Amino acid sequence: MSDIENIDPFANTKNADSEEELEQEFEAEEHGETRPVRPTVAINYQNNLEVKTNFCCQIDRDIHTEGTVISITNAQKTTDNNGSSYITYTVKVGEEEVKRRYSEFESLRKALMKLYPTLIVPPIPEKHSFADYATLQSKAKEDVAIIEKRKRMLQSFLNRVSNHPQLSNEHVFHKFLEAGVSWNEVLNSRPLSNLPKNILQASPPNLSSRSSSASSSPTGSTAHQTVLPNPSASQQLKNPDQRFLDSEAFTNKFAHHISQNLEKTNKRTWKRLNDLSNDYAELGAIYNGFSLNEHGELANAIEKVGQAVDSSYMTTGSLTSSLEAEFSEPLQEYSQFAQVIKQVLKYRHLKHLQMELTAETLERQKFNLEILEKSDQEAKRLEEALAKERGLHDTSIQNSQSFDDENNENAIGENGHHDEFSQNADISTLSKSHQKRRSGSKLFSVLSHTIHGIMDVDPEATRRNSLGKTRESIIQLEEALVITTEDLKKISVSIQNDLDRFQRQKIRDLRNMLLNYAKNHVIWCKKNLSSWEEAKVEVENIQI
């Protein structure tokens, strides 16, 4: 990746995450004060976007105001007119509040992916798994833990979009956040209604002449683009771009490390911590019951140990909750990000294939045109030769008939009459001569008919039609090749720029995730240390 090597992800790591802050939090908790509320997701929402001065609506102005964070303040069960229930999420931007359901978040993301196929559109939480439905059955959609997790991850999605340098300017996104707007109407109006069914059959909407204003619309597929091939992702490129081969390899490694290694191990660790918390709860109750059977200093010591175990139960439960929100969920999000990047690279791969296949088709059509033109020339020469032969043959027959008529007239004039034998001989000779001529004429007619049958009834019209269609196809393919070549250049630049932006975002986010991981363990250890030190004092007071 370009301009990434010089970034120090651990520069200036103190400030808000310093040791002093940890001490203050710990002391506050020791005195029973409320622990400061942590962000629901460990990401840096503010990306220092360029200052924007022209806004298409109030929502656009709000999300580009420094310090603005989109929040999901509530999730509640809603019933429609048909009696079906679903969860609606209350989204707040500035003073604006709007309620959206999960399926609407999903359709928003799909719309952004179609409008911006060269950009890394942030993921949303996945739908309920079969395991969720098997465990919770009909209550899966109403499970509080699942709903809270969705709230956090959907909030992360909205803030990532609002801080993206291009996605944040999309008016479709603004409409999603605007109260009183029917989302179904947005989905069935411009620019989404103008998008082609197959995005490969048109230039990328975000790279065409289309602007991001509300009145704009993407460029649909034109006549020359309808001739574009529809390649398969399994096809190999003849001349691949090494930059994107490296990006693909890096993304595959990243996805493997996140989803196959880190995420799986983290899930096991989280589960064991959760089990440990439950064991602490059971053990604390046992110690407290045990203390009731004893007296004096021993009873006090046992009770204090039970209280320390109860404290460990509380702190471990708090640790698992914090780790889920500040580490596990962002980790899951980045596992999804890897799949998003694969889709973006796949789109570029298909457009590159499309350009190569268009070039190959164009070469074939040019070759076919040469063959057709040669065939046309040969056919014209053959027709000229046949026409000349027919003309000579007709002239020969006319000359023969004139000669025979003259001879007959001369013979009758000289002799006055013929005997029967002479007349019969002449008639026989003339009959044989005419039969030969008719036989030759019949053979010529059959040959001519066979040639016309091979070349179609109207060979000249057929040739003209084939040549015209081929030339028209070549013109369209040449135009399509110019467009796809230019599109591929723009696509490559756009994808590379967003990959660089994502890499910087990833460094920031992973840094925050690791700091939060360490911070939560430090707090957990310090709280446990305090409670167990108190228990130690009581145990040491037992007189032996």
Image (tube, helix red, strand yellow):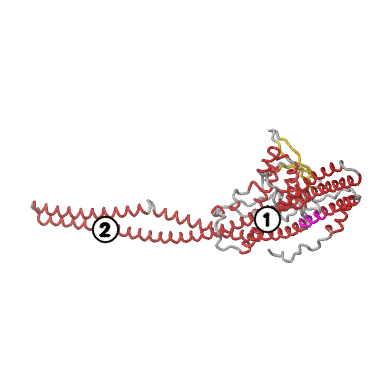
Q: Identify the residue position indicated by label 1 in the image.
A: 261
Query: Of the numbered discs in the image, which one, if any, rests on residue 395?
Result: 2
Within-10-Å neighbours for mark 1: few <14, some 14–19, many 20+: few
Query: Of the numbered discs in the image, which one, if any, rests on residue 274?
Result: none
Q: Nearer the viewer, mark 2 or mark 1?
A: 1
Please state the horizontal and vertical placement of residue 482, each as a whole percent of the image. 58, 60
Residue drawn at x 13%, y 54% is 426
Name the side, left or right, on which 483 lies relative to 146.
Answer: left
Name the side, left or right, on which 378 lies relative to 123.
Answer: left
424 or 274, nearer to the observer: 274
Please state the horizontal and vertical placement of residue 120, each as a whole percent of the image. 68, 55
126 or 157, nearer to the observer: 126
Amino acid of disc 1: Asn
Is residue 522 part of the magenta span, yes or no? yes
Please state the horizontal and vertical placement of residue 489, each as a whole percent of the image. 62, 61
Within-10-Å neighbours for mark 2: few <14, some 14–19, many 20+: few
Is residue 368 part of the magenta span, yes or no? no
Indicate the quadrant where residue 293 lies: top right
265 or 1, nearer to the observer: 265
Give the quarter of the figure containing the N terminus.
bottom right
Q: Point out the stretch of residues depicted in magenta.
A: 513-523
